Image (tube, rainbow, N blue to C red):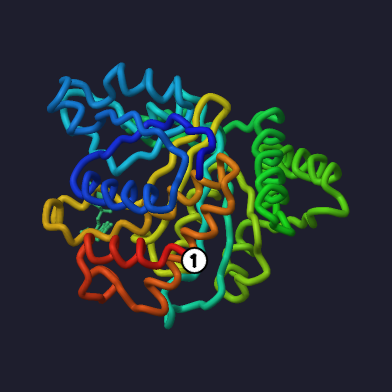
Amino acid sequence: MSGGQRIAATLIPGDGIGPEITASVVAVLDALGAPFAWEEHVAGMAGIAAKGDPLPGATLDSIARTKLALKGPLTTPVGGGFKSINVTLRQKFSLYANLRPARTILPGGRFEDIDIVLVRENLEGFYAAMEHYMPIGDDPKAIAMSAGFNSRAECRRICEYAFEYARKNGRKKVTLVHKANILKALTGIFLEEGREVARKYAGEIECNDRIVDACAMQLVLDPWQYDVIVTTNLFGDILSDLIAGLVGGLGMAPGANIGPEAAIFEAVHGSAPDIAGKGIANPLALMMAAGLMLRHVGRHDLADRLTAAIDKTVRVDAVRTGDLGGRANTEGLTKALIGNLA
Ligand code: ATP
Ligand code: MG
């Protein structure tokens, strides 16, 4: 961005390969002229090492202030009673929308030309973890029960997010995915609210709905019919991995967790401790997460240039890291990407 306004953003390099892939992404964003003014902070094992806390107050304060973060993979320390860092962030900042795009990049995969964005509700449904057992006779765990809940307000909010995302990103169709034929109340209100929201976009964004099991089958038989999918927590968890599988697995999958108080962008993969420090990690998932971040702040121009550079580098020039069957290291791929920024 030439001479424009800088946007403060929190940068969390993370654990394992996190610092390596973050450095690559920052170098490419700098070459692109991205507007972010980074505030770098630690979390995960790096947070423990530096401040004895996997989620230090200074890191949380920075996210609260900037409302925008790019986060490398974090390892939640086992033992010591630490709560999952990702769950803590989700709850702390009410990150209700989980955004998981899946787009074909590598040629020769299972499917060409896939471009689907899945929007998953992140706070309700069956993931509220209200579970308990009931005894029968001398078996204290004879029956297990789990209570899920969806609120109308949240169903409306997630559907509004999906339609607004479609509008801002030039997408044409939103599919509401539910199980309202069986879970008539729980997912029925989701379908009702979704249809209500769709009315406001009539004539601009097409809306249809699918029962989740049929959707799963169609995603494998004819994924090209989908554009934006919006669904409740559990279905979204499963389908987001399914669509990642359509385009080559979790290794290249970006994600975002978005709420009114913050938006956090990340790679879906973990910290890959087996290859950490070797300079061979693939930075593309985090790179694409940075692309989502650019779109989130309205810089579609820069996101489009970044996407074009990734496509040219990986598809045409065939510069790929080892996990994609190539011979490039992180630095080589980074240089090739920078060279391909139009
Ligand atoms: P964590 O405990 O943080 O979840 P993990 O090893 O369990 O880490 P991933 O980090 O997702 O899970 O790694 C799974 C496999 O995929 C590992 O063999 C790892 O080396 C590989 N992998 C993951 N991400 C990348 C990447 N960006 N580049 C190259 N290989 C990767
Ligand atoms: Mg893992």
Q: Position of residue 91 (x, y in %)?
A: 45, 25
Task: Confirm whether residue 138 shows in the render.
Answer: no
> Left or right: 155 with respect to 38?
right
Residue 222 vertical placement versus 175 (above, below): below
Residue at figure coordinates x 18%, y 32% from the top left? 46
For the residue marked with disc 1, what is the amino acid? Ala
Q: Position of residue 82 (x, y in %)?
A: 24, 25
Q: Position of residue 299 (x, y in %)?
A: 57, 46
Residue at image mark 1: 308
Q: Nearer the viewer, residue 202 or 192?
A: 202
Q: Nearer the viewer, residue 338 or 195?
A: 338
Residue at figure coordinates x 16%, y 50% from the top left? 273
Q: Nearer the viewer, residue 149 or 36?
A: 36
Q: Nearer the viewer, residue 309 or 120?
A: 309
Task: Confirm whether residue 295 shows in the render.
Answer: yes
Residue at figure coordinates x 56%, y 70% from the top left? 114
Location of residue 317 (image quadrant): bottom left
Mark 1 packing: few (<14 Cα in 10 Å), some, or many (20+)? some
Location of residue 136 (image quadrant): top left
* Label 1 element class: helix
Residue at figure coordinates x 72%, y 51% from the top left? 181
Residue 169 vertical placement versus 105 (above, below): above
> Left or right: 39 with respect to 105?
left
